[in-house]
Image (cartoon, helix red, strand yellow):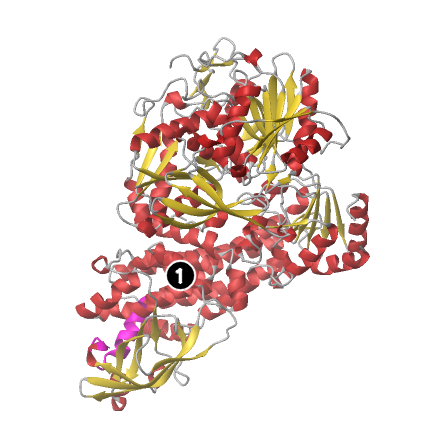
């Protein structure tokens, strides 16, 4: 059985700044990282493999330009068995629908699908759409915001998913698509031996042709959404700052809370 | 400064740094406060293959350079010197087996360490600190066995380690030449752990007594030859004291980084305090000390691997780096001012942690004895 | 390159370099001839340069959409009336205010859809009273719990029949699982987690504005050639409309549920207590950081939050220390929140935390370190010990 983990290479958003005068992104020195949520997905994939054993393989898959192979190297260093890079000029400009289609076609080509894992969302786009998108293309059940896998047995699994009111205990048949939250585990760090393996690693590259993609479903052409405008949000500035004794400060704070009508 | 590290050494450093940043720093204050042993962090170190660094390839290790091991200790200590000690203490404990163990002993014990079991070294006793020749633990021969009685004190990793190398007297009449090294395993009958120390610093490490009560061990557990215990100990320390130097370096670098970044954001008199010359000089001196300690330590490590005579240069590195750590952490607290004295900020812990590096694995006074005896011998 | 791609119109390019800075992927440089050159290996066709170029010298060509949709077939605004375990959610009502605005602008009807197991007619009336003209409800025992696949199938069928031009729902846990599935099923565009919606009356295009890159930039997104245009809206951004007694159509939407393929079941829905309250919907959040000092001191934060009727948030440090559970975590790897008032107690305000809360209307920070970065974004900053200030304050409330 194959466990697929969808990962994305993203700019470290905590370093992305906006140049207000020029109205542009300052990308200097911003490093590329594996989307942090995807690391939880990789860890869970490795954990499942360790648990069920056999000939289970953890296959990381990403769509992106050639340099996205660095993201695959990072997860190979953690212990993933294989890495697939879905990369072709024809995929450029894909929105979440086209991305989920392309990943779906690539995973389908690999076959022997048991579980497809992804992080709950990527920190650059924050959309969280690709997981459910892939599930929809396959017609597989999906469990989003998974915080715990309770058991996997007889082609079925039980998981707990976060909800706005608590959590649900969900049972699903395999194959299934899961998106995971941070609570599910603590991703392992790369090992020394993993890092050495990663250094020599070259991913399998799939082009649009390799996965028999419908050209109307990929890239810019297969993307219903278009970015019309990108702009910087209004800047949040520090306001008033008070120093003094606790008694005095609590008085001022009380006043502010009254003004805001929350007391 | 570029130390022209090998690719493997760079990888070790990267991994240990990541462990420090992501796993150790977020929890170090908690462990320090509670004085708890970080089993979870040790597991991360093992899973990342750090214990394989100093174990030869034939025994599940990776057989990397001494410097690679020191880089791991330095980076882990950058996060928390106490947690790093679980690692460095294991390197110390297993080094005699690597250097002097029989093939059988190596096959039995080294793969365990490579896969994350801890080791400890037991020499010190209540009456035998710097005066290590004064140990009282006895191992009496009884056919193919030895019966060990006595108590070891201040033993790093005592209780959490699975494998122990301890020194006991097999022939008290011969003094230090009557001392023998034994390999012990946790769980042996008559091998117990006594008092767990409550320490000033490195509180995330465990320091406890090893108590031997009619502990019966087979002669195959003797490391090297009978009566060779002290020589082995000295040869071990000649190398492993660099681990203390690396630990001191990590603490010192962390204090320097914390001080500079704090000085840049702390404003007094309307400007960052880093803009005041008085503080700039303190910080510059800190940097000079840290870098020179590093250069000395790394070069000493290269000499160890090259098979040079290293007793004095490793002693210099240990004494110098640990003195630097004490000075630099004290200065860092000064740069932080009142905040530096508070537990909410990390530098007071670094200052407490630094102190031990001047004391253990030979006090810095003992280091100076070693250095002095060497230079007096050498310089005509 | 085919029909799709990006092109620099050399005659118009002045080599000013604005595009170089605008490209988030480092794919543009000014070549030796002083003209912008795009590295196709790196370019993702995001279009940021097209927008940034002051001389209209960059053009993005899109292939003809092969998807033939007669946009005129679609009209009206449909909102998703989220029901959680039988309870109508607040975000369901919030959708009605923004839905109403768009519907009025277009001069079309506002309808809503409810999916659930029972008593939907009651909720339908509530929706009408909050502004919906028509409420469709899909009721079946199998739909009591939120089951992604069944809900998506039901919604897909309804959309096929009703053909709305706009379909919106809350960006809640349910909305963010369900709507992407629906969008992929009917193969249209979806814009997630919008904070602003408007409609271009001429084209009927929904202007969907959302934050990206951790709130560092905002993007306005269109779905020009597909219908319906689907968006999820961040909870608490839109107001709940006034409730007034009003008439509207309530229609049961029937279809064959026997075709449902039950490959997944919800065995149990665990509802946690008020203390574990939903951060998304809270008006006020009291959030605890390292400066709280210990797990024991966290009780002060709980008590304070209780007094204010606020939800309890936390920084990553506090969650990692095991003082509080993960659902409370605000920030990059936790939850993104935007309450009316965010009270940061003992939180230094690392950038990873800031990206999760800086869209809050008012930020109040209490921290003993006057240099803490949280003060850079706090509306009101208090330099002092929270363990002294908050007890004093609670005496007054």
As drawn, the residue found furthest toward the top would be C11
Element class at badge 1 = helix
On the image, the x and y values in percent for residue B155 come to 39, 75
Say whether residue A98 is left or right of residue C376.
left
On the image, the x and y values in percent for residue C153 come to 49, 29
Vertical arrangement, residue C332 with respect to residue B96, above or below: above
Q: Indicate the chain on which mark 1 is placed.
A: B
Magenta highlight range: B221-239
Q: Specify the quadrant that holds the C terminus of chain B.
A: bottom left
Q: Is residue C47 magenta?
A: no
> Is A214 in front, or is C71?
C71
On the image, the x and y values in percent for residue C238 come to 68, 32
**Residue at left offset 72%, top offset 42%:** C379
Say whether residue C286 is left or right of residue A165.
right
Q: Is any part of residue A22 visible from this angle? A: no
> Is B65 in front, or is C299?
C299
**The quarter of the displayed image where residue A247 is located:** bottom right
> Is C397 in front, or is C356?
C397
Q: Is any part of residue C252 visible from this angle? A: yes
**Residue at left offset 60%, top offset 63%:** B343
Vertical arrangement, residue B196 with respect to residue B287, above or below: below
> Is B6 in front, or is C318?
C318
Determine which residue is flagged by label 1: B42
Q: What is the chief secondary structure element of the magenta stretch?
A: helix
Q: Is residue B229 magenta?
A: yes
Vertical arrangement, residue A83 with respect to residue A255, above or below: above
**The quarter of the displayed image where residue A171 is located:** top left
């Amino acid at each position: 059985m194959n466990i697929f983990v969808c990962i994305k290479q993203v700019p470290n958003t905590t370093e992305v700044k906006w140049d207000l005068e020029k109205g542009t992104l300052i990308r200097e020195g911003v490093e590329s990282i594996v989307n942090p949520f995807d690391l939880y997905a990789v860890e869970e994939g490795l954990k499942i493999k360790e648990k069920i054993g056999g000939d289970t393989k953890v296959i990381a898959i990403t769509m992106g330009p050639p340099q996205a192979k660095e993201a695959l190297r990072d997860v190979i260093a953690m212990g993933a068995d294989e890495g697939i890079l879905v990369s072709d000029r024809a995929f450029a400009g894909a929105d979440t629908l086209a991305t989920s289609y392309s990943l779906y076609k690539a995973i389908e080509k690999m076959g022997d699908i048991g579980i497809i894992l992804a992080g709950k969302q990527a920190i650059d786009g924050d959309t969280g759409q690709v997981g459910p998108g892939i599930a929809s293309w396959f017609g597989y059940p999906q469990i989003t915001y998974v915080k715990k896998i309770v058991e996997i047995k007889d082609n079925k699994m039980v998981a707990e998913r976060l909800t706005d009111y608590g959590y649900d205990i969900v049972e699903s048949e395999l194959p299934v698509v899961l998106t995971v939250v941070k609570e599910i585990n603590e991703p392992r760090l790369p090992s020394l031996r993993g890092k050495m393996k990663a250094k020599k690693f070259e991913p399998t590259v799939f082009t649009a042709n390799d996965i028999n993609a419908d050209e109307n479903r990929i890239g810019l052409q297969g993307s219903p959404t278009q970015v019309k405008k990108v702009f910087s949000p209004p800047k949040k500035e520090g306001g008033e700052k008070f120093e003094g004794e606790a008694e005095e400060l609590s008085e001022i704070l009380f006043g502010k809370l009254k003004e805001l009508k929350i007391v | 400064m570029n130390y022209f590290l090998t690719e493997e050494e760079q990888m070790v450093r990267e991994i240990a740094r990541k462990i420090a940043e992501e796993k150790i720093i977020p929890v170090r204050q908690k462990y320090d406060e509670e004085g708890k042993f970080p089993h979870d962090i040790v597991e991360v170190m093992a899973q990342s293959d750090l214990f394989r660094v100093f174990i030869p390839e034939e025994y599940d290790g990776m057989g990397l350079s001494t410097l690679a091991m020191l880089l791991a200790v330095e980076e882990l200590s950058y996060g928390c010197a106490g947690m790093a000690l679980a690692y460095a203490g294991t390197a110390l404990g297993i080094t005699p087996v690597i250097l002097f163990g029989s093939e059988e002993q190596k096959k039995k014990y080294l793969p365990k360490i490579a896969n994350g079991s801890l080791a400890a070294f037991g020499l010190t006793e209540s009456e035998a600190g710097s005066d290590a020749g004064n140990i009282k633990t006895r191992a009496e021969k009884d056919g193919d066995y030895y019966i060990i009685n006595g108590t070891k004190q201040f033993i790093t990793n005592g209780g959490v380690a699975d494998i122990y190398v301890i020194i006991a007297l097999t022939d008290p009449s011969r003094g230090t030449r009557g001392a023998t090294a034994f390999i012990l395993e946790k769980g042996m009958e008559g091998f117990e752990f006594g008092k767990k120390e409550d320490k000033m610093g490195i509180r995330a490490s465990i320091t406890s007594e090893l108590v031997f009560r009619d502990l019966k061990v087979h002669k195959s557990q003797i490391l090297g030859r009978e009566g060779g215990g002290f020589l082995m100990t000295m040869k071990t320390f000649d190398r492993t004291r660099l681990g203390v130097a690396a630990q001191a370096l990590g603490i010192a670098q962390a204090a320097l980084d914390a001080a500079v970044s704090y000085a840049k954001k702390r404003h007094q008199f309307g400007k960052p305090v880093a803009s005041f010359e008085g503080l700039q000089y303190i910080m510059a001196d800190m940097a000079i000390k840290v870098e020179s300690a590093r250069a000395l330590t790394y070069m000493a490590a290269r000499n160890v691997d090259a098979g040079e005579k290293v007793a004095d240069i490793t002693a210099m590195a240990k004494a110098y780096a640990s003195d630097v750590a004490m000075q630099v952490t004290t200065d860092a607290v000064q740069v932080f001012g009142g905040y530096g004295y508070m537990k909410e900020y990390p530098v007071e812990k670094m200052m407490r942690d630094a102190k031990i590096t001047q004391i253990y694995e030979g006090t810095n006074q003992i280091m100076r004895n070693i250095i002095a005896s060497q230079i007096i011998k050498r310089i005509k | 390159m085919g029909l799709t791609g990006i092109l620099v119109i050399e005659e118009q390019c002045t080599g000013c370099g604005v595009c170089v800075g605008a490209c988030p992927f480092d794919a543009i440089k000014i070549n030796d001839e002083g003209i912008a050159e795009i590295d196709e290996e790196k370019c993702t066709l995001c279009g940021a340069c097209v927008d940034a170029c002051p001389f209209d010298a960059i053009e993005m060509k899109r292939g003809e959409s092969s998807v033939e949709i007669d946009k005129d077939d679609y009209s009206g605004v449909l909102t998703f009336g989220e029901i959680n375990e039988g309870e109508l959610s607040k975000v369901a009502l919030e959708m009605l205010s923004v839905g109403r605005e768009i519907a009025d602008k277009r001069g079309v009807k506002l309808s809503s859809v409810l999916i659930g197991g029972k008593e939907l007619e009651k909720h339908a009336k509530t929706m009408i009273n909050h502004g919906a003209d028509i409420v469709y409800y899909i009721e079946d025992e199998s739909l009591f719990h939120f089951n992604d696949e069944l809900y998506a199938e039901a919604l897909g069928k309804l959309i096929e029949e009703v053909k709305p031009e706009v379909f919106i729902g809350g960006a809640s846990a349910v909305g963010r699982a369900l709507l992407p599935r629906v969008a992929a099923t009917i193969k249209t565009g979806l814009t997630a987690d919008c904070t602003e919606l408007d409609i271009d009356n001429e084209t009927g295009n929904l202007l969907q504005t959302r934050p990206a890159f951790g709130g560092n930039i905002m993007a306005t997104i269109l779905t020009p050639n597909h219908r319906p245009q689907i968006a999820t809206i961040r909870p608490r951004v839109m107001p709940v409309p006034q409730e007034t007694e009003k008439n509207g159509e309530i229609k049961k939407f029937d279809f064959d549920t026997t075709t449902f393929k039950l490959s997944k079941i919800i065995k149990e829905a665990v509802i946690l207590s008020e203390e574990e309250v939903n951060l998304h919907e809270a008006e006020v959040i009291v959030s605890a950081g390292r400066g709280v000092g210990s797990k024991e001191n966290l009780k002060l934060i709980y008590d304070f939050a209780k007094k204010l009727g606020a939800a309890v948030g936390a920084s990553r440090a506090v969650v990692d220390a095991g003082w509080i559970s993960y659902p409370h975590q605000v920030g990059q790897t936790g939850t993104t929140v935007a309450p009316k008032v965010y009270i940061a107690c003992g939180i230094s305000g690392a950038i990873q935390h800031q990206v999760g809360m800086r869209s809050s209307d008012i930020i109040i920070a209490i921290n003993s370190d006057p240099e803490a970065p949280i003060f850079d974004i706090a509306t009101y900053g208090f330099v002092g010990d929270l363990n002294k200030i908050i007890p004093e304050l609670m005496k007054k409330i």
